[in-house]
Amino acid sequence: MVICINSTEKNFKLFVHIILLLIFLCFTPIGFSLPSNFQIVEFEKQIDSQPMIVLKQANNLYKDALVSNNPESQLKALYYICYAKINSSEYDDIDGLAKKGLKLAVKTKNVYFQIEFYSLLSEVESLKGNFSQALGYVNKNLQLGYSLGEEKIIGEALSDRGYIYNLREEDGLAIADVQSALDIFLKTGDKDNISQNYNLLGIINQDLKDYESAINYFKESITYMDSEYDLTASIYNIATAYMEIDDLSNALEYFKKAENIAKKNDDKITLAFISFGLAKLYKRQSVIIKALKYSKIALEYFDHVKDEVMIFNCHVLLSNLTIEVENLKQAKIYLDKAQLQSKVMKLPARELKFSQALLAYHIQREDWKLAYQTQTKILTLSDLIHQQAKEKITNELKIKFNTKFHKSKNEYLYKQNELQKTAIAQATSKQYYLNSLVGLGFSLLLMTYLGYKQQIKIKQKLYKMTITDPLTNVANRRYILRKLNHLLKRRKNFKPFALIMIDLDYFKKINDNYGHNVGNDVLIHFAECATTCLEEYSRVGRIGGEEWLILMPNVTTSTPVMQILDKLRERFAIHQIDSLPEDCKLSFSGGVVLCKDKKVSLDNILIEVDKAMYQAKAEGRDRDIYLLPKY
């Protein structure tokens, strides 16, 4: 469930704008659901374009929820606070908020929010480079998916785990997980996840220097895409792959395509990555002025969001560019900044990249003693990385499970190791830093970028489709019966409730006389009236045709039910349906059962409320029949 932006810098995988959230939802399994008053529509309209407004509203909601001691509202508020902060690039305290939300979700046994907050924490740990911790959170979601038997959750968790394996450069394991996820989504026809996993396979193959396969995977991902936001990422990735094989004309063409779409959508984070890619491309073409311009644009944005890895990459690139224009004073400034960041990151690959830039600086200054010392360090680091790569590949092969990482790919990795040995030998004999780049098994990759904003919309839209009647936008039959069954099965903490069945009077005549489109307008009108009349925790659902069920929890007498039905009847009678004559009276017949006995079955209570409703119709319609509290 990741849409990733791949870079050409191996080992510097991604700044995850929004990873894995996310990631899992769309078809919420039985056993958990969104809070009944979840303000998806209100917050979702602004979460992308005006995240600071959503952040303010969600903070106010959280304060109110704390005062009223409402765990459901607290979870909802924490959920949107975290995502509003991500969209506004405020990452400092997201992990603390997500852990608070996870603790509350576990305490209240809310599986939906457990999955959400595990995904958030996985994203945060990936941003920090704590990949082992991120894997732990993703595996939690995988366990939940298996326990619930939800293929979509399982597939998205496998995809997320493959993504993290890719960040750790465990490419064999990454391909196994991503291919397994892709098999699930191809079977279910989930176009968005199919697209994302083809994109991720392209990134992994690019890491393996199989650029032809990478480009094919990226192009295949585009055929399943509906959103321009995701399209930009794949076009960018195609550009980086072409650049790696020195097809600079195609690379520039795709960079420009991605840039135009990102500008159109005001997608600043993608523009930053595109600026970095263009800077590298112009450097290869020796157009240093343009390379400097785009490097500074990228640095300005990455510095704003405090993406340390990308800031390091920009500083190294800028040092190389300023060396080429012989501005050694400025190059030293960039190198000093990059050195501080490499010490914080403490990874051999990043230290190697810094050392290569430093070698170029010493050579330009003709400081041969320091150049020799730096080259010696580069060779030591190259040997270390090469040895780690061999050990990693061996370990992956030992624990490989049902992977489609076929034999030809393993042969390709072996050939790459041989090429690396040859290149390192050349670097040793010539003592020149450019030759060492040819021999590295891991050409330093820019961090993968993940599109979050569109994923949230997709997840929530697909989830809503599974529980909502498409015409009236209220609960569908399956969902309202599930909620009723949930109330009946609360054995330890059973609370009385009212069940209402409603049938619209003379609805068939409306369809026959005015047409089904007018009938649909009447159904929509009733649903809107019921939604506005019901209290916060009550639910209305359409169970078929013109029949409806209403659940009213925590009701012990008929008084509140009578008040609601009188109010609903009055509003329903007043309509503004243009195609329906004003004198055409709208009414309904209702049956009401007050349930006080937790031992009643679902079938029996439905039979009783259906009898009451038909009794109301038999007695002249436009009335309600109340059963004594038999249950």
Image (tube, rainbow, N blue to C red):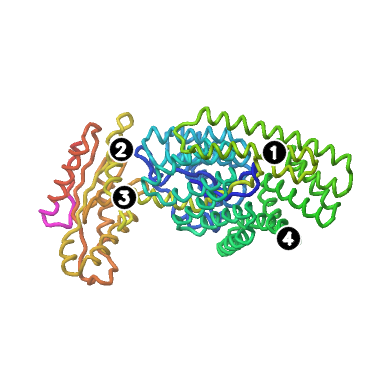
Nearer the camera: disc 1 or disc 4? 1
Amino acid of disc 3:
Ala
Q: Which is nearer the N-term, disc 1 or disc 4?
A: 4
Nearer the camera: disc 2 or disc 4? 4
Other-residue count near label 4 (Cα within 10 Å), few / some / many at <14 / 14–19 / ≥20: some
Q: Which residues are magenta?
A: 616-624
Nearer the camera: disc 1 or disc 3? 1
**Residue 173 location, x and y as percent?**
52, 35
Q: Which residue does the image show at 79% across and 38% down from the upper left? A: 429
Q: Which is nearer the N-term, disc 2 or disc 1?
A: 1
Task: Give the residue at mark 1.
Answer: 422
In the rendered structure, find residue 475 and report the number of the disc placed on it. 3
Task: Give the residue at mark 4.
Answer: 293
**Residue 137 location, x and y as percent?**
52, 34
Give me the C-alpha separation between circle 1 and circle 3. Answer: 66 Å
Q: Nearer the viewer, residue 222 or 471?
A: 222
Residue 448, can we see it? yes
Give me the C-alpha separation between circle 2 and circle 3. Answer: 15 Å
Q: Nearer the viewer, residue 548 or 98?
A: 98
Q: Which is nearer the N-term, disc 1 or disc 3?
A: 1
Task: Give the residue at mark 2.
Answer: 486
